[in-house]
Amino acid sequence: MERPVYDARTMGLRYHAAVCQTSFDAPRQRDEISDRVDRMIEMVEQTVLGYEPFFDVRLLVFPEFAHAVPVHDDVQKLRETLAVEVPNDYLDRYEAVCRKLGCWIQTGTFLERTEEHPDAVFNTSVLVGPTGVELVYRKVNPWIPWEVHASPHDIAPDGDHFPVARTEIGMIGCAICYDWLFPEVTRELAFKGAEILCRVSAYMDPWGATPPMDWWTLFNRARAVENTCYVVAANQGARMDQYPPFSWPGGSMAVDFDGRILAQADPGPGEKVVVAPLDLASLRAARSRRQGHDMRAHHRPEAYRYPHASGLVPDSDEISVESLRQRIQNAKDRLP
């Protein structure tokens, strides 16, 4: 089906975002990643074209582990079999489709390896737009003890690990899955100006989108409200036999800056795409106008001591499940 090339500059600050829920089998080798990229690009093209008679879809967000799943609990095995460098050829392909369609893609995560850190694997998501990479985010809070990815906090404890991209469709930040249970992560992004928070997740049962433990919905709404941000949250929709040992409940969603659920996929596995309107002009007006319930302006940083308390100590040595267990216990021993 033929269609015109989009000019991203003409679409304004009222547009739609799409959460694109995937359901792939877990790859065992990196040469399987290309097929997943093929399908995700197809989903992007189908979504933008399919909704074109109704509105412009300009931001598309994919879930954690969309490219590769940490099927090993050994860092070197992950580096040898599944990890890739960032940037890479896959990002070139995403850039090409963004340029053609005038959209931005928050990629599902890559298992990232670098020459600089030969004993580490990072869990990394990239925001790609029509002119290339806008930001690279490495998960700061891996789901320990099971995830043996390194946190950038392990490598550079005092580094700046929370980039925010200034784009034609707003200020965009990203955090990955377990990051969202730490309010400091999204607060850091919001205080850097983020207006849209992309959540790239593989959130498993029972902490999914259904009561009585629907943490997925709870934290997405809470983070939107406390930061006066839109949240666009894509969750993994794989079955247990695809990504053992967990089942992945989907429920991908978008939330407005007052915590309203704008759109949500029905809980349950499978590929699903839901779209929701984002109105950056309204968000900016609300941030400017409000005096009440403006938790950014009401923040009292001097009142809090806990950010400087001892917690999980960074460690740049090669990570294992057992070393993580010991670090967690050490942190517990220091708690009051």
Image: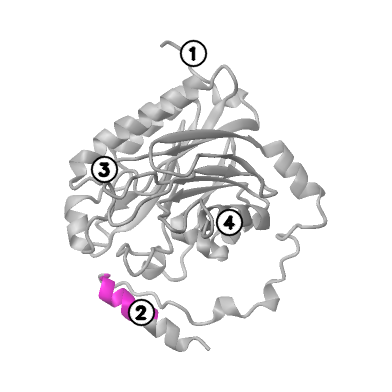
Specify the amino acid type for callout 2: Arg
Residue at position x 69%, y 76% from top? Answer: 302
Which tag is nearer the camera, tag 3 or tag 2? 3
First-in-chain label (2 vs 1)? 1
Q: How many C-alpha atoms fall within 10 Å of the one at disc 4: few (<14), some, or many (≥20)?
A: some
Q: Is residue 59 left or right of residue 143?
A: right
Location of mark 3 (residue): 25
The residue pinned by badge 2 equals 327
Give whichever of discs 4 and 2 has the lower sequence position. Answer: 4
Q: Residue furthest top?
A: 2
In the rendered structure, find residue 57 and report the number of the disc placed on it. none
Which amino acid, by three-letter code, is at mark 1?
A: Pro
Which dot, 1 or 4, sits closer to the camera? 4
Residue identifier under label 1: 4
Q: Earlier in the sequence, mark 3 or mark 4?
A: 3
Q: Looking at the magenta stretch, what is its main secondary structure?
A: helix
